[in-house]
Image: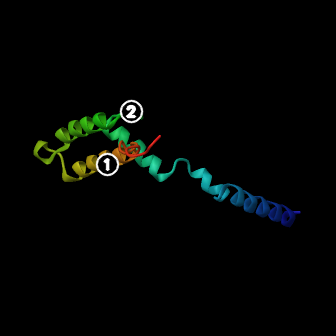
Amino acid sequence: MVLKFAVILGIVCILYRWAFRQWPWQGLGGKSTRSQAIFRARKLLGVEQGANREQIIAAHKRLISMVHPDKGGSNAAVHEANDARDILLDELPDPGADIGHDT
């Protein structure tokens, strides 16, 4: 009985892997690392999900003015703010992507 259950469970896992290209337990981890990084970057800079380039840069400048070593902050905080800005800017659509394409 237990062996039969183990075989059926194994087959189900293999079919799941084939259908979804990941093992069933890989879906239990929640958000991907990239989406977690984006969430943390938005939270650190205090911007909404639909923030544009100007909003991200303005939020970054505000944060840098607070965490800069000259203001009592640290180099690590500045690097974290810069990384957050870069992550969010990388997520924006490329404004020059449609240039040069004929419609």
Mark 1: which secondary structure? helix
How many C-alpha atoms fall within 10 Å of the one at disc 2: few (<14), some, or many (≥20)?
A: few
Q: Mark 1 Cα within 10 Å, few/some/many (few <14, many 20+)? A: some
Q: Is residue 35 left or right of residue 66?
A: right
Q: CA distance from mark 2 to mark 1?
A: 15 Å
For badge 2, the amino acid type reads: Glu
Quarter of the rendering containing residue 4: bottom right
**Left or right: 65, with 97 as reference point:** left
Q: What residue is shown at x 65% (from left), y 58% (from top)?
A: 21
Image quadrant holding the N terminus, namely bottom right
Q: Where is residue 24 drawn, in percent x and y?
A: 67, 56
Looking at the image, which residue is at 47% across and 52% down? 33
Colour scheme in the image?
rainbow
Judge from the rendering whether residue 3 lies leftward or rightward of residue 96; answer left or right. right
Is the residue 97 above or below the residue 6 in the image?
Answer: above
Residue in front for this viewpoint, 48 or 43: 48
Q: Return the mark for residue 86.
A: 1
**Residue extending farthest left:** 70
Q: Residue at x 65, y 59 (%)?
A: 23
Which SS class for mark 2?
A: loop
Which three-letter amino acid code belongs to the residue tagged 1? Asp
Q: Position of residue 40 (x, y in %)?
A: 39, 44
The residue lying toward the viewer, choosing from 62 and 69, is: 62
Residue 48 is tagged as 2
